Image: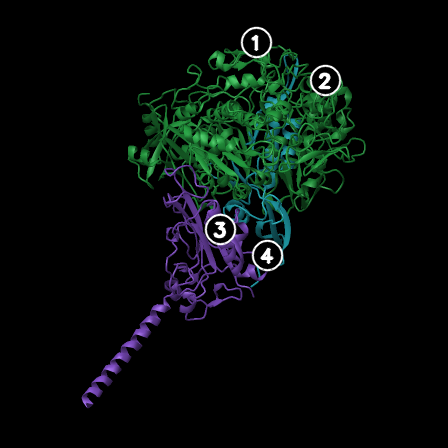
Amino acid sequence: MTTTGFLTDSTLCIGCKACEVACKEWNQLPDDGYEWSGHSYDNTQALGHSTWRHVKFVEDTPEPAVGGNLGEQLPAWSFSSDVCKHCEVAGCLEACPTGAIVRMEFGAVFIQPDICNGCSYCVVSCPFGVVQRNEEDGRAFKCTFCSDRQRAGLKPACAQACPTESIRFGPLDELRDQAQDRLKKLAARGIEDAVIYDPTETSVEGIHALFLMRGDPRTYNLPQQPEVPTIYQKKGWTSAVIAAGSMLALALLSFLGESK
Amino acid sequence: MSPRNADADVARSICPYCGVGCGQLIFHKDNKLISIEGDPASPISRGRLCPKGADSYELLTHPGRELKAKYRRPHGTEWEDVELETAMNMIAEQVWKSRQETFVEEQDGETLMQTRSIAHLGGATLDNEENYLIKKLFTGGLGMVCVSNQARI
Amino acid sequence: MPGLGTSFGRGGATTAQQDLQFSDAILIMGSSMAENHPVGFQWVIEAREKGAKVIHVDPRFNRTSAMADYWLPLRAGSDIIFLGALINYVLRNEKYFREYVVHYTNASTILREDFQDTEDLGGLFSGFDAEAASYSPETWLYEGAPVRQPRKGKHAGHSDVVGGHGKDRGGEAGDIGEHKNDPTLMHPRCVFQVLKKHFARYSAELVERSCGIPQEKFLQVAEAYTSASGPDKTGAICYAVGWTQHSTGVQIIRAAAILQLLLGNIGRPGGGILALRGHATIQGSTDIPTLYDILPGYLPMPFFESDSKKLSEYIEKHSSKTGWWSNFDKYIVSLLKAWYGEAAIRENEFGFNYLPRVTGDHSHFGYWLDMADGKLHGLFVMGQNPAVGAPNARLERRALSKLKWLVVRDLVETETASFWKDSPEIQRGEMKPQEIATEVFFLPAAGHAEKAGSYTNTQRLMQFREKAVDPPGDCRGETWFMYHLGRRLKARAESEQTTRNAALNALTWDYRTGGQHGEPVVEEIVAEINGYTAADRTLVPGYKELKNDGSTACGCWIYSGVMPKKGENKARKREPQGRYGHGWGYAWPSDRRILYNRSSARPDGKPWSERKKLVWWDEDKKEWTGFDTPDFTKTKPPDYQPEKGAKGDDALAGDAPFIMHPDGVGWLWVSSGLKDGPLPTHYEPLESVTANPLYPSHAISPVADKKERADNAYAHPGDKRFPYILSTYRLTEHHTAGGMSRTLPHLAELQPELFAEISPQLAIELGIENGKYMVLTTPRGIIELRALVTERIKTLKIDGRHVHQIFVPYHFGYKGRAVGDVPNDLLAISEEPNVRIMETKALVCNAKPGRLPRNKRSLAIWKQDLKRPA
């Protein structure tokens, strides 16, 4: 089956939060509580067990929003809808001891709710802080990539609702091409600071939810160098081998020396 | 793992919130709502919805929705239950009484045919057909002139 | 909206949302379209991505500004200065589309010698009657136009310059006579020259001084917008209640209409004025109005005395000899036949005297003040929540307690339904439930998926909804409620055959019912709205078939054609085709998607350009053709010239695209039909922090109605107690007064609490911290709310001093999950003279840090604040 993905394009996002609501409606998620944050228009604040799409509001980004506005002293306000990245090498999947987390035929990383035992290893293993345990329910939750809809040939609910096509859904390789095209188009309009977020060079080895934004992805909470935690374990193991080897060599050397 | 609207019936509908008029697909089965999403065929909305439109299934199914008629008697401190038919009869009685007491057929020898003691407010989220019956009965039948809604622009 | 109606002929948006994709520039002003019409905004994004310039002019940098190429902040309430300066820029720099202006507008029409402008009279047009605070518009007429003699009587005066929603149909109808024109536009009294003179002082310098926009920024935007018009380019304007909810609201839209006519942007693809409506069928509820001053299809309600007796006089008064309104008699007679059926006969003037007469201001605010004074018995509230959603909500709630009975129909128990139980007045101990005599009925309503029916959207498109499921419990639709209430009342009337019951006895009410709850069959109502022949109830194919002799019945002539034959409901159609999606829904009139589209072709019938072609004359077929249904007589050739004495549509030439107007052209100048002048003029809001820079002695509109009284008090000019501008707005995450959003978990969590947006400068000045509470006061009320301190709010330099603006989303109330004090407690009830809309977008207030107690002490704090030296 074709590997599918999201391309979330912040330069088209109007910050309406239709994706958040459409996701919650389709997936029948509870509310996050009714706390007013005082941080721009962001009151759901982060991805979590009950929020699988989250629109981040960035006021006064260093560069003005798309279109440019008049003059540098004017404010800017940009929005970007965050979601599970469905990593190529997924920390959560690797860490899951029960086999509850599986990779679907179209590439999604899926937590099977009937198998999850709530151990939370996946929570600490996600390089993006996406997975969260529902303390009342005991299990971990995150975006399912609307696997039920995808199997029936439907778009994920967020992509279906998005009014401005800021969230695109489709075959991952096509989206990668579209993202490149979009960069070129923006550059032709004088917007040269747009970037694609798709960390293929790290141990995550690429993601299935690509992002396009202006400026530094870190402004939108996207780490520059996301790594799968298991690589640290590998590092740990490798260095232990090296250490053991050196000691052996040293012993051999001394043995050889003595024999002279 | 099939989507819950997989074998549902579909009604073609329109979002009840703002004036954009987004197309909606209402999935239902056995007289129960299942889900609501954008209608991709709409030449205006192309299947998309805003957060309110995307929440319109919840609008109809959330626990805060009132499903029973309620009555508050004069000087009462709490709501009381009332049968819908009883409430309709009581309302009709009140309308009739107020109208009879205040209707003016003519003034200075000229036609007036109005009552100003009963008023109506609302309509911009009601259907055209509903507004038609409101205007027809209230103004055309009862002589009510105090009829208003949200629309000004 | 009479601003559009008088300018173009019809009160609806001239264009369709999808058409914005063809624009070369889009000016969004008086609207945060991205926030309040997000799905419609996709077409703006579409245009932007194709290279169109998107300009947002708004006091507040919001989510729309963030998506625009240009954002200009302006002082709330200075819109006419800004638009006037754009008009002046067009005229001074010859940016107007000359051929369009000469042929398709009244620019060349010569005006009367005795007209005097606001520029001559220091802020008043000629004809002002100071005692009545109203205008007599004779001097505004075209030179040579016959003066309609007002019918004098004890109660006259209300009706002769009717204005109001009746003027959605395009100005005071009537004979405009043999007026003179100067196609060179040089005559000193031609509209073009008068316009030039009128707007001469609306300069970039004035914009800087009074709107707070630096001159160079204004000029940059003026050039960007005006240079995107002409034979090969078009620009569109989108507005919403940010324009209408002002004491000069109609004239702000008039200014936009003048600008678009001068630039040749009406009736052309990518052009037009898109009025963005905030409810699902705001357009529909003026088309089929639950409003006091009109009948369905913009036929005026008869006014007492001036329209009292004879149908013939009423028809004579409201029809015109030339243009489409020559058909007025057919529409009113057919409406009377639809309502009164067999009882409507020629001998009783088709039941004309069954209709009640209007005797004054029976609008929401007009009758609500009567209610506050204990003059009303009963009130129906259906799908509206005035206890928090209406201005001076405190007065609104207190007025409810004076009623004998109240019926509320809604999805949830609104603040209006439970005003007697948990309103701020009860919390503060001002009122006690035991002392409130109002009998209250709450009837739960059916939702949109639980009933069949149609909405008319922002672009005049009727879209029918299929019913999915039955409403639960006691929930019912309004057709059910009205039908069964009517049935009961008609039964009473039948047993009392009196004069006053004659209308009720005559009223046709024979709808079949069906379904689980005995709902009337909606298609039967649609059929009545569409119209049928009286003899055999055959559906008419459209309004052209309606007759004035009682042989046809039609509930709303502009909707006629929606059900041309049995079983065919065009509003229900879902087969979109072509550029404008014909085959999906039904646009009034006659499925025309872009109004006045004859003007997309040159006078000779050829498109202005290949790029901007829309409707053109097909010389071979001898008919108009194109991408849209022509808004023109299909076979009338472009070179058609009427014979002398021709009537109706035949009196209009083949190059007269504005067919509703008696002269067939767009009106830069409105000679009759508006109560506050033939041209827009800047007046300050009813409460303002600055003087009127143009007319020091006429700060505010001389004809706006402040409804000033002890419980609806105002700050006076220069009032030191209220130094800040206050403006209210909507959030994407909520809907109107919150009845459809504040109770919903998935919306409430997105914006859970009331707040105000203020600038960092104001926050520092007042010691208010982001996220902490603050208190706002006005002469009407006091509220507490959280502070959202943001760089997006700018301090403006007006007349050399810094002016702060405070912005409050108005959705909130004390019930539901997202809660807060009621911002509308701060607002005043006021009425713009034409449509009686309140001013919500520009008022004054005071602000300070801190919280309010939830008891009587909060009122003491408020009264203390009012006692400060003014």
Q: Nearer the viewer, mark 2 or mark 3?
A: 3
Chain B tint as drawn? cyan
Q: Which residue is mark 1?
A: C114
Q: CA distance from mark 3 to mark 4?
A: 40 Å
Q: Which residue is mark 2?
A: C312
Label 4 and label 2 in one chain: no
Q: Residues within 10 Å of mark 2 (few under 14, many from 20)?
A: few
Q: Which residue is mark 3?
A: A184
The x, y position of residue C28, in whole percent, is 50, 35
Identity, as a three-letter code, of the amino acid under mark 2: Ser
Kindly indicate which chain is depicted in purple in the rendered structure: A
Q: Which mark is residue B5?
A: 4
Q: CA distance from mark 4 to mark 1?
A: 71 Å
The x, y position of residue C562, in whole percent, is 70, 37
The x, y position of residue C719, in whole percent, is 35, 21
Q: Quadrant of residue C848?
A: top left
